[in-house]
Amino acid sequence: MWGDAMRLLNHLLCLVIIAAILVASVTHAGSVDVEAQKLAYSLSLDKAVVVILYKDQYGTGWFVDKNYVVTAAHVVDYREGARVEVIHGAYRCEGVALHVDRAHDVAVIRVSKPWPEAKILPVATSVSKGMQIMVIGYPFELYQLIGNIEAMSNNPRASFGHVNWVDPAKDIFEIGARTDAGNSGGPIIEMSEDAVVGIVSFALHGEVATLYYGTACDAIVKDLSAWNIPFHAVKVEQAAPTPAGMNYRPSHASVITAVAGGAVALVLGVLIGIGVRRGRK
């Protein structure tokens, strides 16, 4: 009888241990879900960018205010007064390049009508090496695949990486995320605050690789302030490194948690993308 009682006690003890493991695992899974939500790409960012069509070429622009779009000056051939088409799906309007900064490759376009669905992006006050970034816009490959500006503009590409190098004296930095022609003027966004730290500007071709560079937000803030363009400034601190395997913010994040001996597996789906500039073909 004493032996039966001990066996029953052992069984109960095992059940308590298993239950504790399961509860701990579920609690951990819940915290992973929260983290995954923070890392997930927000589809609202798709509505922060537009195609800037000037003559036979296009680039990417982004809303800094409901009436103003920032892009690269070379997208409008450095011409103040240049008339462009601003396109995102069914939204289409004329715009005028009010201000151009040739030295820093920055232009501001006033749209003829606001887009009610537009997402306004804040501007960071500084950029630093190692920041986690995403680049959003319309690389030329998208146009080659889709073959239609309006259809392409509905679904911009997002790519993810880090700031590789910064030159504060020249207000430029190297983009450690995939870019390509067609993305000139597109926003380079710091991932913790969704704030613009720069715009895609130019590329340098070497024997080993092509390096892509952006105009730093410091120059953009100075221009916007000098031109009296409304914007929201955000101070962005250098983000702490994330755990291995969780460096990128995926679109349509798919989170799967599984309990096996108290271990929890996290699987994230990742969407990629972006570019610089090229004429339409």
Image (cartoon, grey):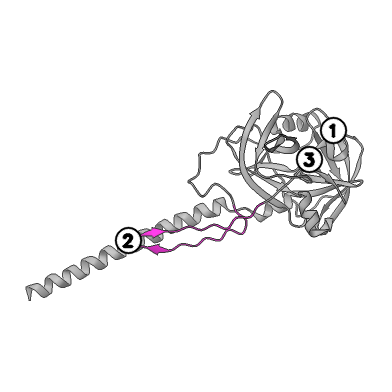
Look at 35% across and 62% down and name the residue there. 23
Highlighted range, magenta: 250-272
Callout 1: SS: strand
Residue found farthest to the left? 2
- Res. 6 in view: yes
Query: What is the x, y in percent for residue 39?
Result: 56, 51
The kind of secondary structure the magenta stretch mainly shows is loop
Distance from the alpha carbon under mark 1 to that under mark 2: 61 Å
Asked if one can make out residue 65 in the rendered structure from this viewpoint, the answer is no
Q: CA distance from mark 3 to mark 1?
A: 10 Å
Crowding near the residue tagged with mark 2, few <14, some 14–19, many ≥20 C-alpha atoms within 10 Å: some
Q: Report whether 258 appears left or right of 209.
A: left
Q: Tell me if residue 147 comes above or below residue 170 in the rendering.
A: below
Dot placed on the residue nearer the N-terminal end, 3 or 2: 2
Q: Nearer the viewer, residue 150 or 70?
A: 150
Q: Which residue is mark 3?
A: 70
Mark count: 3
Residue at the disc numbered 1: 100
Q: Label 1 neighbourhood size at 10 Å, few (<14), some (14-19), many (20+)? A: many
Position in image of residue 208 (x %, y %): 67, 36
Placement of 209 over or under 153, stated as above or below: above
Q: Is residue 113 left or right of residue 47?
A: right
Depth check: give the residue in front, 104 or 45.
Answer: 104
Q: Secondary structure at mark 3?
A: strand
Q: Three-letter amino acid code at disc 1?
A: Val
Task: Check contact, mark 1 vs mark 2: CB within 8 A.
Answer: no
Q: Residue at x 92, y 46 (%)?
A: 55
Residue holding disc 2: 21
